Image (cartoon, rainbow, N blue to C red):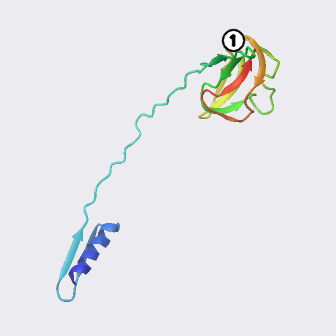
Amino acid sequence: MNYEDIKKLIDDMGNSKLTEISIDFPDGTKIGMKKEVKVVEKLQEKNIQHIEQKEVNEIVETETQEDNCKIVKSPMVGTFYLKPDPNSNPYVEIGKKVKKGDILCIIEAMKLMNEIECEFDGEIAEILVKDGEMVEYGKPLFKIK
């Protein structure tokens, strides 16, 4: 066995899952190799802390000068729903009067349904998002007069 064969054997051993090899040649030559095995500890998840999503009613309001409407923006990223379930009536419709504390919609985030409440009295002038649409933080949802 020449130098190149031995070098190739070492490289092959390094790239394989073998940890030990011994070769006995007919002429009495013996080659043995052992690969150092690193023990990797698997970390157990001891305490998974669930972050409770605080009730988010931080609705950003912007008053537009042209139509004197306040804009209700999304306080989080998620899926926008106008009704609590597919067979129900929507929480609000264009022209409906709303009071502070009324539910405007639901935003589903991480399998949690978050009710978005109105922060002021008014009337729904425009719904800016379609039911089932993904919304980003700060995306305008409603215009309220």
Q: Quadrant of residue 133?
A: top right
145 left or right of 137? right
> In this rendering, is residue 61 above or below 48?
above
- Work out whether residue 91 can be spotted: no
Outermost residue, left side: 28
Residue 29 occupies quadrant: bottom left
Residue at (73% x, 14% y) in the render: 68
Residue farthest bottom in this picture: 27
Residue at horizontal 78 percent and vertical 33 percent from the top: 86
**To which residue does mark 1 refer?**
120
Q: Relative to residue 15, is residue 115 depicted above or below?
A: above
Judged from this view, the residue extending furthest toward the front is 66
Amino acid bearing label 1? Phe
Residue 78, given in percent of the width and then of the height, sits at 63, 33
29 on left or right of 72: left
How many marks the image carries: the answer is 1
- Can you see residue 54? yes
The x, y position of residue 13, in whole percent, is 30, 70
